[in-house]
Protein backbone atom coordinates (compact mmCIF):
# COMPACT_ATOMS: atom_id res chain seq x y z
CA UNK A 1 0.00 0.00 0.00
CA UNK A 2 2.77 2.42 0.89
CA UNK A 3 4.73 1.64 -2.28
CA UNK A 4 1.60 2.02 -4.43
CA UNK A 5 0.79 5.40 -2.87
CA UNK A 6 4.37 6.56 -3.38
CA UNK A 7 4.33 5.45 -7.03
CA UNK A 8 1.28 7.67 -7.63
CA UNK A 9 2.53 10.64 -5.61
CA UNK A 10 5.34 12.05 -7.78
CA UNK A 11 7.50 12.63 -4.72
CA UNK A 12 11.30 12.70 -4.96
CA UNK A 13 11.65 10.35 -2.01
CA UNK A 14 10.20 9.42 1.36
CA UNK A 15 10.60 7.29 4.46
CA UNK A 16 7.59 5.75 6.17
CA UNK A 17 7.55 4.17 9.61
CA UNK A 18 4.93 2.58 11.88
CA UNK A 19 5.71 2.02 15.57
CA UNK A 20 4.00 0.67 18.64
CA UNK A 21 4.99 0.73 22.30
CA UNK A 22 7.44 -2.12 21.83
CA UNK A 23 9.29 -1.15 18.66
CA UNK A 24 9.22 -0.55 14.92
CA UNK A 25 6.50 -2.42 13.03
CA UNK A 26 7.26 -1.19 9.53
CA UNK A 27 9.91 0.98 7.90
CA UNK A 28 10.69 1.64 4.26
CA UNK A 29 12.71 4.20 2.30
CA UNK A 30 11.63 4.94 -1.27
CA UNK A 31 12.89 7.13 -4.09
CA UNK A 32 15.71 9.63 -3.83
CA UNK A 33 17.05 11.94 -1.16
CA UNK A 34 18.29 14.19 -3.98
CA UNK A 35 16.33 13.71 -7.20
CA UNK A 36 18.59 16.17 -9.04
CA UNK A 37 21.90 14.68 -7.97
CA UNK A 38 20.60 11.10 -7.96
CA UNK A 39 21.25 10.26 -4.29
CA UNK A 40 19.14 7.33 -3.09
CA UNK A 41 16.88 7.73 -0.06
CA UNK A 42 17.96 5.72 2.98
CA UNK A 43 16.08 4.81 6.12
CA UNK A 44 18.63 6.88 8.07
CA UNK A 45 18.53 9.91 5.75
CA UNK A 46 18.38 13.24 7.56
CA UNK A 47 15.32 15.47 7.08
CA UNK A 48 14.54 19.03 8.06
CA UNK A 49 11.56 18.26 10.29
CA UNK A 50 10.52 21.93 10.62
CA UNK A 51 7.42 22.21 12.84
CA UNK A 52 7.76 18.63 14.05
CA UNK A 53 10.36 20.37 16.26
CA UNK A 54 7.49 21.90 18.23
CA UNK A 55 6.59 18.67 20.00
CA UNK A 56 10.16 18.23 21.27
CA UNK A 57 10.40 21.83 22.47
CA UNK A 58 7.05 21.37 24.22
CA UNK A 59 8.45 18.34 26.05
CA UNK A 60 11.44 20.41 27.19
CA UNK A 61 9.14 23.13 28.53
CA UNK A 62 6.95 20.61 30.32
CA UNK A 63 10.02 19.12 32.04
CA UNK A 64 10.63 22.59 33.49
CA UNK A 65 6.97 22.86 34.49
CA UNK A 66 7.36 19.57 36.37
CA UNK A 67 10.36 21.06 38.19
CA UNK A 68 8.51 24.27 39.06
CA UNK A 69 10.93 26.37 37.01
CA UNK A 70 8.21 27.46 34.57
CA UNK A 71 4.52 27.92 35.31
CA UNK A 72 1.92 27.16 32.67
CA UNK A 73 -0.28 30.08 33.71
CA UNK A 74 2.32 32.59 34.88
CA UNK A 75 3.03 35.77 32.91
CA UNK A 76 5.79 34.57 30.59
CA UNK A 77 6.97 38.18 30.33
CA UNK A 78 8.78 37.58 33.62
CA UNK A 79 11.30 35.36 31.79
CA UNK A 80 10.81 36.80 28.27
CA UNK A 81 10.81 40.59 28.56
CA UNK A 82 9.90 40.95 24.87
CA UNK A 83 6.49 39.43 25.70
CA UNK A 84 5.88 41.60 28.78
CA UNK A 85 3.08 44.15 28.44
CA UNK A 86 1.89 42.79 25.07
CA UNK A 87 0.18 45.05 22.52
CA UNK A 88 -2.63 44.05 20.15
CA UNK A 89 -2.60 45.18 16.53
CA UNK A 90 -5.91 46.90 15.71
CA UNK A 91 -5.13 48.00 12.14
CA UNK A 92 -3.04 50.45 10.17
CA UNK A 93 -3.43 54.21 9.89
CA UNK A 94 -3.63 56.20 6.65
CA UNK A 95 0.17 56.20 6.33
CA UNK A 96 0.33 52.42 6.82
CA UNK A 97 1.74 52.61 10.33
CA UNK A 98 0.53 49.92 12.78
CA UNK A 99 -2.09 50.91 15.37
CA UNK A 100 -1.82 49.18 18.74
CA UNK A 101 -3.65 48.86 22.06
CA UNK A 102 -2.69 47.11 25.32
CA UNK A 103 -3.71 43.44 25.50
CA UNK A 104 -6.45 42.48 27.94
CA UNK A 105 -4.07 40.20 29.83
CA UNK A 106 -0.59 38.67 29.86
CA UNK A 107 0.78 35.95 27.61
CA UNK A 108 1.38 32.65 29.43
CA UNK A 109 3.32 29.51 28.60
CA UNK A 110 0.00 27.72 28.11
CA UNK A 111 -0.93 30.31 25.49
CA UNK A 112 2.39 29.79 23.70
CA UNK A 113 2.08 25.99 23.69
CA UNK A 114 -1.53 26.08 22.48
CA UNK A 115 -1.18 28.82 19.83
CA UNK A 116 -3.69 31.03 21.63
CA UNK A 117 -1.25 33.83 22.58
CA UNK A 118 -2.30 36.10 19.70
CA UNK A 119 0.90 35.60 17.71
CA UNK A 120 0.98 34.42 14.11
CA UNK A 121 3.15 33.58 11.09
CA UNK A 122 3.93 35.95 8.22
CA UNK A 123 3.15 33.26 5.61
CA UNK A 124 -0.26 32.49 7.13
CA UNK A 125 -1.62 35.79 8.42
CA UNK A 126 -2.04 38.83 6.17
CA UNK A 127 -1.95 41.24 9.12
CA UNK A 128 1.45 39.90 10.25
CA UNK A 129 2.86 40.20 6.74
CA UNK A 130 1.47 43.75 6.46
CA UNK A 131 2.97 44.62 9.85
CA UNK A 132 6.42 43.42 8.78
CA UNK A 133 6.15 45.32 5.51
CA UNK A 134 5.38 48.46 7.52
CA UNK A 135 8.24 48.11 10.01
CA UNK A 136 10.76 46.30 7.78
CA UNK A 137 10.88 42.67 6.69
CA UNK A 138 13.15 40.74 9.07
CA UNK A 139 15.80 38.26 8.04
CA UNK A 140 14.63 34.64 8.17
CA UNK A 141 15.83 33.03 11.38
CA UNK A 142 16.33 36.36 13.14
CA UNK A 143 14.81 37.26 16.49
CA UNK A 144 13.08 40.12 14.70
CA UNK A 145 11.15 37.55 12.66
CA UNK A 146 9.21 36.42 15.75
CA UNK A 147 8.77 39.88 17.32
CA UNK A 148 5.29 41.11 16.46
CA UNK A 149 2.23 42.57 18.14
CA UNK A 150 -0.60 40.21 19.01
CA UNK A 151 -3.49 39.77 16.57
CA UNK A 152 -5.99 39.25 19.41
CA UNK A 153 -6.18 39.10 23.20
CA UNK A 154 -4.48 36.01 24.65
CA UNK A 155 -6.76 33.01 25.03
CA UNK A 156 -9.55 34.24 22.77
CA UNK A 157 -8.64 32.54 19.44
CA UNK A 158 -6.46 29.77 18.00
CA UNK A 159 -4.01 30.79 15.30
CA UNK A 160 -0.90 28.82 14.39
CA UNK A 161 2.11 30.85 15.44
CA UNK A 162 5.70 31.43 16.47
CA UNK A 163 4.64 30.66 20.05
CA UNK A 164 6.86 27.58 20.28
CA UNK A 165 9.88 29.60 19.15
CA UNK A 166 9.25 31.78 22.19
CA UNK A 167 8.81 28.62 24.28
CA UNK A 168 12.32 27.56 23.27
CA UNK A 169 13.65 30.94 24.32
CA UNK A 170 11.88 30.53 27.67
CA UNK A 171 13.68 27.20 28.12
CA UNK A 172 16.96 28.98 27.43
CA UNK A 173 16.11 31.83 29.82
CA UNK A 174 15.44 29.63 32.84
CA UNK A 175 18.18 27.04 32.23
CA UNK A 176 21.00 29.26 30.95
CA UNK A 177 21.57 26.70 28.17
CA UNK A 178 21.17 26.88 24.41
CA UNK A 179 18.02 25.05 23.41
CA UNK A 180 19.93 22.45 21.41
CA UNK A 181 22.19 21.70 24.37
CA UNK A 182 19.23 21.39 26.73
CA UNK A 183 17.40 19.07 24.35
CA UNK A 184 20.52 16.95 23.81
CA UNK A 185 21.02 16.51 27.55
CA UNK A 186 17.45 16.10 28.76
CA UNK A 187 15.30 14.88 25.84
CA UNK A 188 17.22 13.65 22.79
CA UNK A 189 20.06 11.95 24.67
CA UNK A 190 17.86 9.98 27.07
CA UNK A 191 15.64 8.90 24.17
CA UNK A 192 18.56 7.75 22.03
CA UNK A 193 17.75 10.31 19.32
CA UNK A 194 21.39 10.71 18.37
CA UNK A 195 20.79 12.07 14.85
CA UNK A 196 18.47 14.91 15.92
CA UNK A 197 20.04 18.38 16.17
CA UNK A 198 20.05 21.98 14.96
CA UNK A 199 22.21 22.00 11.81
CA UNK A 200 23.12 25.44 10.37
CA UNK A 201 24.75 23.75 7.35
CA UNK A 202 22.91 21.03 5.48
CA UNK A 203 24.87 17.85 4.62
CA UNK A 204 25.12 16.95 0.95
CA UNK A 205 24.02 13.35 1.58
CA UNK A 206 20.93 14.38 3.55
CA UNK A 207 17.45 14.59 2.03
CA UNK A 208 17.23 17.82 0.04
CA UNK A 209 14.17 20.07 -0.19
CA UNK A 210 12.61 19.85 -3.65
CA UNK A 211 10.19 21.95 -5.69
CA UNK A 212 8.33 20.61 -8.72
CA UNK A 213 8.96 22.14 -12.12
CA UNK A 214 5.93 22.65 -14.42
CA UNK A 215 6.82 19.43 -16.28
CA UNK A 216 6.79 17.39 -13.04
CA UNK A 217 10.58 17.17 -12.69
CA UNK A 218 12.32 18.56 -9.62
CA UNK A 219 14.65 21.36 -8.70
CA UNK A 220 16.25 21.95 -5.31
CA UNK A 221 15.30 24.56 -2.73
CA UNK A 222 18.35 25.49 -0.67
CA UNK A 223 16.38 26.55 2.43
CA UNK A 224 17.97 25.47 5.74
CA UNK A 225 15.91 26.07 8.87
CA UNK A 226 18.51 25.01 11.44
CA UNK A 227 20.61 28.17 11.36
CA UNK A 228 19.90 31.82 11.99
CA UNK A 229 20.24 34.12 14.98
CA UNK A 230 18.63 31.68 17.43
CA UNK A 231 17.78 27.99 17.62
CA UNK A 232 14.16 27.85 16.56
CA UNK A 233 12.14 25.75 18.98
CA UNK A 234 9.27 25.99 16.54
CA UNK A 235 11.00 24.62 13.48
CA UNK A 236 14.79 24.29 13.43
CA UNK A 237 15.60 20.64 14.12
CA UNK A 238 16.61 17.96 11.66
CA UNK A 239 16.08 14.28 12.37
CA UNK A 240 15.55 10.81 10.94
CA UNK A 241 12.45 8.62 10.82
CA UNK A 242 14.01 6.25 13.36
CA UNK A 243 14.81 9.07 15.77
CA UNK A 244 11.35 10.58 15.55
CA UNK A 245 9.83 7.13 15.86
CA UNK A 246 11.54 6.87 19.24
CA UNK A 247 9.88 10.10 20.32
CA UNK A 248 6.48 8.76 19.20
CA UNK A 249 7.09 5.57 21.17
CA UNK A 250 8.00 7.56 24.30
CA UNK A 251 4.67 9.39 24.08
CA UNK A 252 2.83 6.09 23.53
CA UNK A 253 4.53 4.73 26.65
CA UNK A 254 3.51 7.67 28.84
CA UNK A 255 6.87 9.46 29.01
CA UNK A 256 9.34 6.57 29.21
CA UNK A 257 11.43 4.63 26.68
CA UNK A 258 14.01 1.89 27.27
CA UNK A 259 14.07 2.63 30.99
CA UNK A 260 14.62 6.38 30.50
CA UNK A 261 11.80 8.57 31.80
CA UNK A 262 11.69 12.05 30.32
CA UNK A 263 8.18 13.06 31.46
CA UNK A 264 5.82 11.94 34.19
CA UNK A 265 2.85 9.90 33.01
CA UNK A 266 0.44 12.55 34.28
CA UNK A 267 2.33 15.22 32.32
CA UNK A 268 1.95 13.24 29.10
CA UNK A 269 -1.76 12.87 29.84
CA UNK A 270 -2.06 16.63 30.34
CA UNK A 271 -0.22 17.34 27.09
CA UNK A 272 -2.69 15.01 25.33
CA UNK A 273 -5.75 16.77 26.77
CA UNK A 274 -7.58 19.44 24.77
CA UNK A 275 -6.47 22.76 26.26
CA UNK A 276 -8.42 25.20 24.09
CA UNK A 277 -12.00 24.54 25.17
CA UNK A 278 -14.55 25.33 22.49
CA UNK A 279 -12.02 27.03 20.21
CA UNK A 280 -11.43 25.12 16.99
CA UNK A 281 -7.74 24.45 16.36
CA UNK A 282 -5.76 23.17 13.42
CA UNK A 283 -6.79 25.20 10.38
CA UNK A 284 -4.04 27.23 8.72
CA UNK A 285 -4.73 29.77 6.02
CA UNK A 286 -2.07 31.07 3.68
CA UNK A 287 -0.88 34.31 2.13
CA UNK A 288 2.04 32.48 0.47
CA UNK A 289 0.54 29.37 -1.17
CA UNK A 290 3.80 28.61 -3.00
CA UNK A 291 5.34 28.05 0.45
CA UNK A 292 2.40 26.51 2.31
CA UNK A 293 -1.09 25.93 0.95
CA UNK A 294 -4.11 26.33 3.24
CA UNK A 295 -4.28 23.22 5.41
CA UNK A 296 -6.82 21.47 7.62
CA UNK A 297 -6.13 17.90 8.78
CA UNK A 298 -9.74 17.09 9.65
CA UNK A 299 -12.01 19.69 7.99
CA UNK A 300 -15.15 17.87 9.19
CA UNK A 301 -14.10 17.69 12.85
CA UNK A 302 -13.99 20.30 15.64
CA UNK A 303 -10.32 19.60 16.32
CA UNK A 304 -8.67 20.68 19.56
CA UNK A 305 -5.10 21.35 20.70
CA UNK A 306 -3.09 20.00 23.60
CA UNK A 307 0.24 21.21 24.94
CA UNK A 308 2.01 20.84 21.61
CA UNK A 309 -0.31 18.69 19.48
CA UNK A 310 -3.41 18.69 17.30
CA UNK A 311 -6.13 16.44 18.80
CA UNK A 312 -8.90 14.81 16.76
CA UNK A 313 -12.11 14.31 18.82
CA UNK A 314 -13.57 11.73 16.43
CA UNK A 315 -12.15 8.73 14.62
CA UNK A 316 -10.05 9.66 11.62
CA UNK A 317 -10.85 8.45 8.11
CA UNK A 318 -7.71 6.25 8.04
CA UNK A 319 -8.33 4.55 11.39
CA UNK A 320 -6.87 6.99 13.91
CA UNK A 321 -8.59 6.78 17.31
CA UNK A 322 -10.33 9.77 18.91
CA UNK A 323 -7.92 11.65 21.14
CA UNK A 324 -4.86 10.98 18.99
CA UNK A 325 -2.04 13.52 18.71
CA UNK A 326 -0.48 14.77 15.50
CA UNK A 327 1.22 17.53 13.58
CA UNK A 328 3.58 18.07 10.67
CA UNK A 329 6.60 19.84 9.19
CA UNK A 330 6.38 22.35 6.37
CA UNK A 331 8.42 20.26 3.91
CA UNK A 332 5.67 17.59 3.90
CA UNK A 333 6.64 15.47 6.88
CA UNK A 334 3.88 14.22 9.20
CA UNK A 335 3.35 12.10 12.31
CA UNK A 336 0.57 10.79 14.52
CA UNK A 337 0.46 9.27 18.02
CA UNK A 338 -2.55 7.11 18.98
CA UNK A 339 -2.42 6.31 22.72
CA UNK A 340 -5.73 4.42 22.64
CA UNK A 341 -4.57 1.95 19.99
CA UNK A 342 -0.92 2.02 21.04
CA UNK A 343 0.36 2.81 17.55
CA UNK A 344 1.81 5.77 15.72
CA UNK A 345 3.67 6.64 12.59
CA UNK A 346 6.14 8.97 10.93
CA UNK A 347 6.23 10.03 7.29
CA UNK A 348 9.26 12.00 6.12
CA UNK A 349 9.63 13.79 2.79
CA UNK A 350 11.23 17.05 1.61
CA UNK A 351 9.04 18.92 -0.83
CA UNK A 352 7.56 22.41 -1.04
CA UNK A 353 4.87 23.65 -0.82
CA UNK A 354 3.31 22.12 2.29
CA UNK A 355 0.10 20.11 2.09
CA UNK A 356 1.11 18.23 -1.05
CA UNK A 357 -1.69 15.81 -2.04
CA UNK A 358 0.74 13.05 -2.95
CA UNK A 359 2.56 13.27 0.37
CA UNK A 360 -0.75 13.26 2.24
CA UNK A 361 -1.85 10.20 0.27
CA UNK A 362 1.35 8.37 1.28
CA UNK A 363 0.83 9.36 4.91
CA UNK A 364 -2.76 8.13 4.70
CA UNK A 365 -1.64 4.79 3.26
CA UNK A 366 0.86 4.40 6.10
CA UNK A 367 -1.88 5.08 8.62
CA UNK A 368 -4.30 2.58 7.03
CA UNK A 369 -1.56 -0.04 7.15
CA UNK A 370 -1.10 0.59 10.88
CA UNK A 371 -4.77 -0.19 11.52
CA UNK A 372 -4.98 -3.11 9.08
CA UNK A 373 -7.31 -1.31 6.69
CA UNK A 374 -7.22 -2.51 3.09
CA UNK A 375 -7.46 -0.38 -0.03
Image: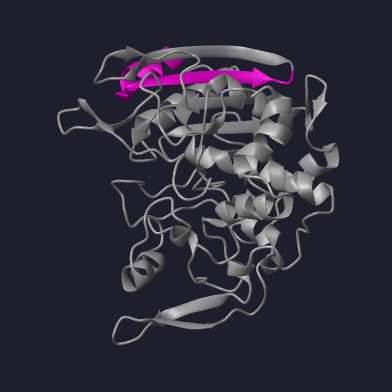
Left or right of 365, for residue 249: right
Q: Nearer the viewer, residue 255 or 198?
A: 198
Q: How many marks?
A: 0
Residue 172, visible in the rendered structure = yes
Left or right of 164, for residue 33: left
Residue at the image point whose x is 57% and y is 46% from the top: 233
Q: Does the magenta-highlighted stretch encompass residue 13?
A: yes
Q: Position of residue 223 (x, y in %)?
A: 34, 39
Q: Nearer the viewer, residue 348 or 304?
A: 348
Taking the view exactly as shown, the residue that stands out farthest to the left is 215
Q: Position of residue 245 (x, y in %)?
A: 61, 23
Residue 117: quadrant of the picture: bottom right
Q: Position of residue 159 (x, y in %)?
A: 52, 60
The image shows residue 241, relative to residue 273, as above or below, that is above
The image shows residue 202, relative to residue 16, as above or below, that is below
Residue 277, visible in the rendered structure = no
Residue at the image point whose x is 66% and y is 55% from the top: 170
Residue 128: quadrant of the picture: bottom left
Q: Nearer the viewer, residue 147 or 161?
A: 147
Taking the view exactly as shown, the residue that stands out farthest to the front is 176
Residue 110: quadrant of the picture: bottom right
Q: Does the magenta-highlighted stretch encompass residue 58?
A: no
Colour treatment of the image? one colour
Residue at the image point whose x is 61% and y is 22% from the top: 194
The image shows residue 161, relative to residue 335, as above or below, that is below
Left or right of 224, for residue 370: right
**Boundaries of the magenta span:** 1-21
Q: Position of residue 356 (x, y in %)?
A: 36, 36
Amino acid sequence: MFEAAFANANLPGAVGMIVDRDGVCFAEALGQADAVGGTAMRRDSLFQIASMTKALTSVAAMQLVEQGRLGLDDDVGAVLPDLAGPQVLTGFDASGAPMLRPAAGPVTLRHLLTHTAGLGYFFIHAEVLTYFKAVGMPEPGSLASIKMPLMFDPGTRWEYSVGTDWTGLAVEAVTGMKLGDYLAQHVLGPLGMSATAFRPKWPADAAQVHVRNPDGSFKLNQAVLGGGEFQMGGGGLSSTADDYGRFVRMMLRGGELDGQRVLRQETVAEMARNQVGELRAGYMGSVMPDFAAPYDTFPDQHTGWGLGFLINPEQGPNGRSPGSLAWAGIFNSYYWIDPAAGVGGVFMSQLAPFGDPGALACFGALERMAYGLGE
